[in-house]
Image: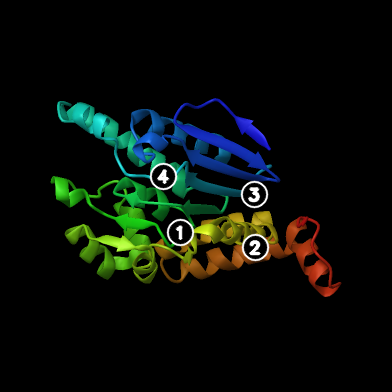
């Protein structure tokens, strides 16, 4: 397993075209600060430009996923000017955008509390798999703030009805309640979490890499394209994929009852 030591607040591990990003501040339940925001953004800039990776898994070291903003960092923020606060917040927004626009499938392995911005780190991923011991909370209102930079991604996941309730109340959600609210896709027993994540990774590895990339583009673009233009857009995509190398291989493999070349168990 290839291991990157480039960063101080996160750790990267690579194995079989899968990269794991591990939030690595277990002493503060992986709460993020300016350094972690910068390092996550830098990691995704690199990941988003690579063509040898297939899946990204995001998780936390130790017992927590991410406890939101680091309290020591927040103490400094109290004395920031508006311009300093804006600059800081724009960096956070950019990090979430880089994660959301990743062309690879992303899985959040939520191994413990996901609080405030930690909810955002989970919500921005494509698939969220939570330990039954995990808890989620959009708790910003409890300290007079709002879940601003994470709101586009949390609202997409939870929908307006649930986002209104939990943005306003800051209620702590069990893993099962988070699943019911749309924040998590799956809840696994604590000792089966890695097994559940591995199963999803294998599902993704069995699919065409380019097809998955195009799926993410469809998900991002089609809701914003009006009728009748969206019909043309989607028709052009499927026509190109049918003629492409990957589509041709996938269809041949299906009819020949064999695994496609991109899938290696």
Label 4 SS: helix
Identify which residue, 30 or 154, lies in the foreground. Answer: 30
Mark identifier at residue 118: none
- Decide which of tag 3 and tag 2 comes sooner along the chain: 3
Residue 244 seen anywhere in this rendered image of the structure: no
Q: Look at the numbered discs 2 and 4 and tell me whether their residues touch, using CB distance below 8 Å.
A: no
Q: Residue placed farthest to the right in the image?
A: 256
Q: Look at the numbered discs 3 and 1 and tell me whether their residues touch, using CB distance below 8 Å.
A: no
User: What residue did someone put label 1 on?
Assistant: 131
- For image coordinates 40% across by 51% down, the residue present is 112
Label 2 SS: helix
Mark identifier at residue 97: 4
Q: Position of residue 55 (x, y in %)?
A: 60, 50
Within the image, what quadrant is residue 256 found in? Answer: bottom right
Mark identifier at residue 203: 2
User: What residue did someone put label 3 on?
Assistant: 54
Q: Look at the numbered discs 4 and 3 and tell me whether their residues touch, using CB distance below 8 Å.
A: no
* Distance CA(mark 3)–CA(mark 2): 11 Å
- For image coordinates 36% across by 55% down, the residue present is 153
- Decide which of tag 2 and tag 1 comes sooner along the chain: 1
Left or right: 257 as drawn, with respect to 168 = right
Q: Position of residue 46 (x, y in %)?
A: 56, 34
């Amino acid at each position: 397993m290839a291991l990157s030591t480039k960063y101080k607040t996160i750790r990267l591990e690579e194995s079989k075209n899968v990269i794991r990003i591990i939030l690595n501040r277990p002493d503060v339940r992986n709460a993020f600060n300016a350094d972690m925001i910068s390092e996550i953004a830098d990691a995704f800039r690199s990941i988003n430009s690579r063509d040898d990776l297939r899946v990204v898994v995001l998780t936390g070291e130790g017992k927590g996923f991410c406890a939101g903003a680091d309290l020591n960092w927040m103490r400094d923020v109290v004395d920031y000017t508006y311009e300093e606060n804006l600059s800081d917040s724009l960096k956070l927004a950019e990090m979430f955008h880089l994660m959301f626009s990743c062309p690879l499938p992303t899985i959040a392995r939520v191994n413990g509390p996901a609080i405030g911005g930690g909810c955002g780190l989970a919500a921005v991923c494509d698939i969220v798999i939570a330990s039954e011991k995990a808890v989620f909370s959009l708790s910003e209102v409890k300290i007079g703030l709002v879940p601003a930079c994470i709101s586009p991604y949390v609202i997409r996941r939870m929908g307006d009805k649930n986002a209104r309730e939990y943005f306003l109340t800051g209620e702590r959600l069990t893993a099962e309640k988070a699943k019911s609210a749309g924040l998590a896709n799956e809840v696994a027993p604590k000792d089966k979490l890695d097994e559940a994540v591995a199963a999803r990774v294998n599902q993704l590895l069995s699919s065409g890499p380019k097809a998955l990339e195009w799926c993410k583009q469809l998900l991002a673009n089609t809701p914003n394209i009006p009728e009748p233009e969206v019909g043309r857009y989607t028709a052009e995509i499927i026509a190109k994929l049918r003629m492409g190398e990957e589509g041709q291989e996938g269809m041949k493999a299906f009819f020949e009852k064999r695994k496609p070349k991109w899938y290696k168990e």
